[in-house]
């Protein structure tokens, strides 16, 4: 007869016991607030009072007919797509450079990673100073270079401010994407590359017909994280423009903050934030497909 | 020729990535009369020190602002969040990697995906929860909420790390008569020290970087963290003390960047979902 095993040898029980605190934390403090975010978007909740009533689709009707909200939704898409296009170009190019051996590479890598390590809010305040309406070093350099004759009010003009926001987001995320692409390059099958060289394919042919197709899953991972980081980011826009001038540069997170926290209208703020969900669902779905794809590929 | 192009490209990327940090450095140590010259004056070169550097802004930052207080607050939150994260995420990662079999892997991916749910979606419901718990304007709110970001990612990191640790040592210990639990308590901690270190560093960097929750829950200047206090409280009305601001940004970024640099490869393994074998 097999002796009954004690708790100390029951893998299934130990497994559950060790997992329980993490699951509990995530369910209580991510799961519950997530559901509450959606519930609040259908409510009349305001900060300061703990009771709230059912509002139906009133919050959604209110924001959908609000030009500031529609503009914020459009800005979120423009900033996300614009910055991620830049990130892909910069990161694939930088990865080609940083895979090679050269003097001072460690220093170069350290500098390249700085934007990713620095807190968002501190980077944003440094860029605010760089884009200052009176003291902008960019304007000085363009003027001395003979490229600028008038004056650029970077953060005072709606279109220029969006350009500035896109530049900062791309600057912040491309180092991260570069490191991911580099990791992907390192794990490419060597025989394929050697075969391409033996067959006489030059650098550009190898890059566009062999490497980039093989790298696609890894670049996709970098872009998906980039989309999440950009679309859901509050700090850059909040500090650079505060949504101004005249509410023209809001993105969904800053508008949700303005209405929900500063304006104390939790219901409307929650409804605005809920519009981030489509971005996230697309990203999560694509990631799951990628994860499954690589799992099949590796076995 | 090819080498020249390579170095030129490397320098170009360094210039783009590093330019704001150079700008922090030069602003932090410039005298005001050198700093506040309008950019339309093309004869005054802003890229260099036209007057000798000064420590005036650094003295202002440490002497007349709450910067040191914000550093202390940040460290309190860091220690608490690190302790919670290690206590919760390390056992969970071990459990998913070694004890729960195939459904553990799926659950692991599920937990990782909660990392994608952003603070900007959750800060409104949290505003209500924090009010209910009476934690408004307290570091306690940050200590409670930051692990919601660190636990999912760190559980995933530990799980991935354990896949690269051979099973033999634990197996041998069990053959030697240890119970499964005794192995976990006595043998495993030594094996996963590098994994735990990665968890500590990730939690540390996250606390230093986080802005959204701090902005939502902390309103008193003396309870702010560094990443909140510097951009929010060093700006009084329309008066920006750019020298002190940039000094604060610089002093916070550089240590963080050094730590980050040492651990970036491990973080990347986590982010690539194992699609890249490290």
Image (cartoon, coloured by chain):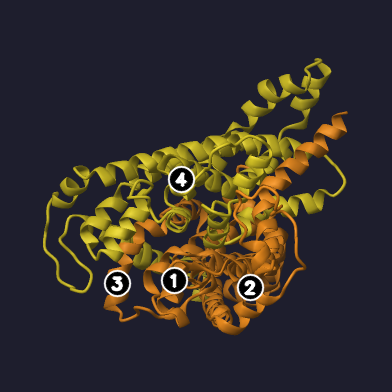
What subunit carries mark 1? A
Instruction: Return the mark for residue A161.
Output: 4
Residue A39 at x, y percent in the picture: 21, 58
- Label 1 environment density (alpha carbons within 10 Å; few <14, some 14–19, many ≥20): some
Are marks 1 and 2 in one subunit?
A: no
Image depth: mark 4 or mark 1 in front? 4
Residue A166 at x, y percent in the picture: 50, 43
Marks 3/4: CA–CA distance:
35 Å
Marks 2/4: CA–CA distance:
58 Å
CB atoms at circles 3 and 2 under 8 Å apart?
Answer: no
Residue B86 at x, y percent in the picture: 56, 72
Instruction: Return the mark for residue B183.
Output: 2
Give the residue at x 59% y 66%.
B205
Image depth: mark 3 or mark 4 in front? 4
Q: Image quadrant of residue B189?
A: bottom right
Secondary structure at badge 4 equals helix
Are marks 2 and 4 in one subunit?
A: no
Give the residue at x 55% y 75%.
B78
Vertical comparison of B143 with A39: above or below: below
Q: Residue furthest top?
A: A199
Which quarter of the rendered picture does the N terminus of chain B lie within?
A: top right
Marks 4/1: CA–CA distance:
45 Å
Q: Nearer the viewer, residue A153 or B175?
A: A153
Instruction: Return the mark for residue A21.
Output: 1
Marks 1/2: CA–CA distance:
20 Å
Q: Chain B's colour?
A: orange
Instruction: Name the residue beneath numbered marker 3.
Output: B129
- Label 4 environment density (alpha carbons within 10 Å; few <14, some 14–19, many ≥20): many
- Tell me which chain appears yellow: A
């Amino acid at each position: 007869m097999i002796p009954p095993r004690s708790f100390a040898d029951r893998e299934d029980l130990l497994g559950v016991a060790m997992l329980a605190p993490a699951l509990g934390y995530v369910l209580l403090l991510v799961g519950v607030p997530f559901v509450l975010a959606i519930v609040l978007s259908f409510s009349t909740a305001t900060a300061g009072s703990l009771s709230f009533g059912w509002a139906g689709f009133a919050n959604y009707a209110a924001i959908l007919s609000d030009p500031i909200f529609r503009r914020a939704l459009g800005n979120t898409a423009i900033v996300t797509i614009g910055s991620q296009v830049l990130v892909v170009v910069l990161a694939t190019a930088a990865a080609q450079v940083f895979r090679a051996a050269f003097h001072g590479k460690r220093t170069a890598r350290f500098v390249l990673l700085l934007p990713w390590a620095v807190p968002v809010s501190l980077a944003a305040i440094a860029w605010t100073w760089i884009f200052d309406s009176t003291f902008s070093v960019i304007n000085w350099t363009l003027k001395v270079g003979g490229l600028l004759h008038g004056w650029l009010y970077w953060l005072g003009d709606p279109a220029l401010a969006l350009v500035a926001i896109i530049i900062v987001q791309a600057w912040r995320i491309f180092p991260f994407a570069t490191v991911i692409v580099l990791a992907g390059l390192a794990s490419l099958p060597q025989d394929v590359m050697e075969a391409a060289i033996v067959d006489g394919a030059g650098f550009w042919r190898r890059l566009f017909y062999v490497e980039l197709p093989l790298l696609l899953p890894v670049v996709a991972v970098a872009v998906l994280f980039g989309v999440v980081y950009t679309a859901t980011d509050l700090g850059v826009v909040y500090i650079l423009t505060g949504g101004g001038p005249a509410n023209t540069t809001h993105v969904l997170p800053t508008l949700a903050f303005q209405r929900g926290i500063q304006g104390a209208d939790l219901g409307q703020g929650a409804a605005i934030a809920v519009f981030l969900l489509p971005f996230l669902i697309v990203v999560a779905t694509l990631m799951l497909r990628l994860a499954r794809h690589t799992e099949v590929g590796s076995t | 020729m090819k080498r020249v192009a390579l170095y030129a490209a490397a320098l170009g990327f360094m210039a783009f990535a590093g330019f704001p940090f150079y700008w922090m450095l030069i602003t932090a140590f410039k005298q005001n009369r050198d700093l506040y010259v309008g950019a339309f004056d093309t004869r005054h070169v802003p890229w260099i020190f036209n007057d000798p550097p000064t420590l005036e802004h650094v003295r202002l930052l440490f002497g007349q602002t709450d910067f040191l207080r914000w550093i202390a607050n940040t460290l309190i939150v860091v220690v608490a969040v690190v302790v919670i994260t290690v206590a919760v995420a390390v056992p969970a990662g071990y459990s998913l990697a070694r004890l729960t079999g195939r459904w553990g892997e799926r659950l692991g991916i599920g937990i990782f995906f909660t990392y994608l749910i952003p603070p900007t979606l959750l800060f409104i419901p949290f505003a209500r929860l924090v009010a209910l718990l009476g934690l408004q304007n307290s570091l306690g709110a940050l200590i409670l909420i930051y692990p919601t970001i660190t636990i999912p990612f760190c559980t995933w990191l530990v799980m991935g790390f354990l896949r690269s640790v051979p099973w033999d040592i634990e197996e041998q210990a069990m053959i030697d008569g240890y119970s499964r639990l005794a192995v976990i308590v006595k043998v495993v901690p030594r094996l996963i020290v590098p994994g735990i270190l990665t968890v500590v560093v990730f939690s540390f960097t996250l606390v230093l970087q986080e802005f959204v929750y701090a902005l939502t829950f902390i309103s008193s200047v003396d309870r702010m963290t560094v990443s909140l206090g510097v951009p929010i409280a060093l700006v009084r009305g329309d008066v920006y003390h750019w020298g002190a601001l940039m000094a604060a940004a610089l002093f916070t970024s550089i240590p963080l960047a050094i730590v980050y640099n040492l651990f970036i490869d491990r973080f990347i393994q986590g982010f690539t979902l194992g699609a890249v074998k490290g």
